[in-house]
Amino acid sequence: MPIQTQGSVRALALVGPTSAGKTTLMEALLLATGATHARAGGGGEMVGDSSPEARARGHSVELNLAGFDFMGDRYAVIDCPGSLEFCADTDAALAAVDLAIVVAEPDPNKAQLLQPTLRELERLGVPHALFINKMDQARGSLQELLDALAPVSSAPLVARQIPTWEGEHVTGFIDLALERAFVYRPGEPLQVEIPADLKDAEAEARFHMLEQIADFDDDLLEQLLSDVTPSVDAVFGDLVREMQEGLIVPVFFGSASNGFGVQRLLKALRHEAPLADKAAERLGVTKGAYVLKAAYAGQSGKLAYARVFGQKLDDGAELVLPTGDRSRVGGLFSVQGATLKKVTAAPVGEVVAIGKVEQASAGQILSLTGQAQQLKNEVRPRRPLFAVALSAHNRKDDVRLSGALNKLIEEDPGLSLTHDAEARQVLLAGQGEGTCGWPSSG
């Protein structure tokens, strides 16, 4: 079984519609790896959705950033808001990750909700896998769900598991690549014998998986036609390569709220997630930090949340902005939700907060080469859908209002500010409460 060479931190994005359970999955990953020690909602504080706005709405309103260690590797997690009103916050971040986990509910009627996310990942060339969450609430067959999801993905969906049931409840899974059965339990799932009544179903599902990946491997296709059983290493090699090249979308499932399926997902990340150099090539970064988001953090002032590429980033390092302007790192912080911890350096692949780079904005490369670097493909701005007229109650507060709005626009790329001189109004425009898809190519 192939294992990725250690060397750089890997970054993954959790994406998908609102209510699919992305933040719950992030909390489950943190808990399973010891980054937190109590389940959120069960006596533990959530790392994600810590802002008052997110708590009031009951869902993410901005990127949640965190990290964890697993079996000697480091992972940065970017939990992306699913709500249409806040989807612009994802635009700059998505191209910078090594792997995106698309989180979905086990409801065939909601399959179409995944299409905008899948299409954008395909456009950007970001490898991605599907995690069907809330399987403890599923009532239909996995095949029915996959049939509903298939039309919204350009690449074939390859089921890596089939569920095992006890009555109407999913109690575990059979790993089709390993041909092993597992029963869910707290912590590590328990390996058991494949149930006798599921052996035929497992064999059929595994052969279908092999047929799908053989479409991109002539040697494997020849083995299948000759009734030769391929080795486990060969099967995993194809699964890894084809996912990384965007030829297939592997499908896993579980229940993040119970921790079910999380260990299997972690092992898939360790063996199959690409390293940071692929994302750097996609962006056009040689040595530098790519800005995912800019935000103001109280006394810390303006921070640029960025991913490091090419070489480690030291506190005090000189950065060159795309404009040619130069700035120095004025503080470097690890990020775990709302908690910032000062560090002296950040390794390749890590996501950190950079202080005192006042001109930095989302979608920029802060170069470490001494020369400005331009992004291969600029982040496409979204067209505002709604606008509201704003004014200060007291004209003396006009300057303060303008400053606050400008900061807000720096933090949220989905917003824009215009001045209507004729009507003497300031118009704040954004995605609003209606539909907003990914920006069109026009």
Image (cartoon, grey):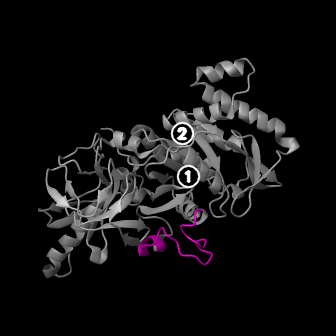
Q: Is residue 330 left or right of residue 275?
A: left
Q: Is residue 422 left or right of residue 53?
A: left
Across and down, in percent, residue 180 comes to 76, 44
Q: Is residue 348 left or right of residue 184?
A: left
Kind of element beneath mark 2:
helix
Q: What residue span does the magenta drawing correspond to?
A: 33-55
- In the picture of the structure, the residue carrying the numbered disc 2 is 152
Point out the image quarter for the C terminus.
Answer: top left
- Quarter of the image where one finds residue 313: bottom left
Establish if 106 lies above or below 127.
below
415 falls in the magenta region? no
Q: Is residue 48 left or right of residue 178?
A: left
Going from N to C along the chain, the mark reached first, 2 or 1, is 1
Point out the image quarter for the N terminus.
Answer: top right
- In the picture of the structure, the residue carrying the numbered disc 1 is 103
Residue 440 visible in rendering: no
On residue 334, the disc is none
